[in-house]
Every structure is written in C-alpha cells, then in structure tokens.
Amino acid sequence: MTTLLLLNGPNLGILGRREPEIYGTDTLADIEKAVAAEVSGVGWDVLSLQHDSEGDLVRDIHRHHCDTVGAIVNPGALMIAGWSLRDALAAYPRPWIEVHLSNVWARERFRHESVIAPLASGVVAGLGPMGYRLAAAALLELVGAER
Ligand code: DQA
C-alpha cells in the first residue's frame, strides 16, 4: 500500500484564480505535482480528490480508507462545521494532516475553530502551497515510524 490521499474540499478546485491575494496563484494541479514529487522518492503515489460537497468527501474517505497510507486534508470552510467529514475522518485508520493555505487565525473569527483539527496528527496553516509539501514530508515520517 503506497498511495497517499490528497483531499481538498469546497472551492479549492479553483485555486489559482480564487482570491490570489489570499491563496496565491498555484493551481491544485501545481500542488498535486509538488506533493507527488515530495513522496516519489519512497515510491508513493498520490490520489488527489477535490469535491465541493461534503458527502462526496465522506464517500471518498470511506472508499479509500483501506488502500491509502495516510492523508492530507484541506477541508476548506468545512473546517467550521463539517461534522460528517469529522466523523468520516474519525473512522479513517491512518495518519492524516490538516492543511490550510492561509493562516486561518489571522483571518475572520469564524475561521478560528476547526472541528476536524482535534483528530488530526498535525495541522499546517499559513504557509501557502508549501504547507502541503511539509504535510507530505511529515506523513513520510509518521507512516515510516508506524511500520
Ligand atoms: C482554507 C481556509 C478556509 O477558512 C477557507 O474556507 C478555505 C481555504 C485555506 O486553505 O486557507 O476554503 O482552508
């Protein structure tokens, strides 16, 4: 089993043209490539899935809970009240890391609480696309340590 799940929630499919002053100009395809490059050295590949609806994300977590080594999850605004996403991740048996491109604590108050963060192995926020690469590097360590 050598597939890393890269899961992005609502509005992250339009990265590159979405409020570039906040989220930068990298597209999701750029981020996928960077994550793939980070893990290719150990022979992992990346399964990248993005959905605008919570149910689709939940279904993909169910579908891939057995065949992935770990996950990087940017829940987008579902961080705020995505309870079914939270419950799906609670049943995901591998390490996963929550990533936000922006520093959510430097933004509006409604972005300060994440319902999924207490379940994550770690959280990376505010480092732009680099955050995904750092999360991938961390998963290599975490999964390696578990073997
Ligand atoms: C985001 C932060 C969320 O508050 C926002 O709703 C997003 C993107 C980020 O990557 O910075 O959709 O998750």
Image: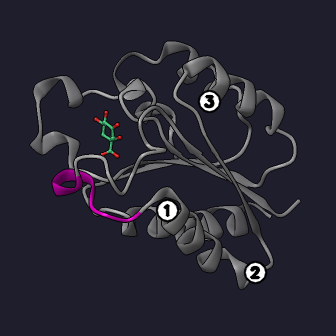
Q: Give coordinates of residue 28: x percent, y percent.
A: 49, 57
- Mark pair 1, 2: CA separation: 15 Å
Q: Give whichever of discs 3 and 2 has the lower sequence position.
A: 2
Instruction: Report the residue marked by disc 2.
Output: 42
Does the magenta-highlighted stretch encompass residue 24?
A: yes
- In percent of the image, x 59 and y 47: which residue is there? 96
- Work out whether mark 1 precedes mark 3 in sequence or the reverse, and give the earlier one: 3
Q: SS at mark 1?
A: helix
Give residue 11's quadrant in the image: top left
Badge 3 amino acid: Leu
Seen at 73% across and 24% down, the residue is: 59
Q: Residue 36 appears in which quarter of the rendering?
A: bottom right
Query: Where 64 sits versus 22, above or below?
Result: above
Tell me how far mark 3 sits from mark 2, CA to CA: 25 Å
Give coordinates of residue 31: x percent, y percent.
50, 64
Quarter of the C terminus within the rendering:
bottom right
Instruction: Report the residue marked by disc 1.
Output: 135
Q: Amino acid at mark 2?
A: Val
Question: Label 3: how many residues lie within 10 Å, few (<14), some (14-19) or many (20+)?
Answer: many
Mark 3 = which residue?
A: 89
Q: Is the residue 47 above or below the residue 63 in the image?
A: below
Sequence order check, earlier mark of 1 and 2: 2
Where in the figure is residue 122, as x and y percent of width and height?
45, 50
Mark 3 in CB contact with mark 2 (< 8 angstroms): no
First to last magenta residue range: 20-26
Whether 134 is drawn above or below 57: the answer is: below
Q: Is residue 1 left or right of residue 106?
A: right
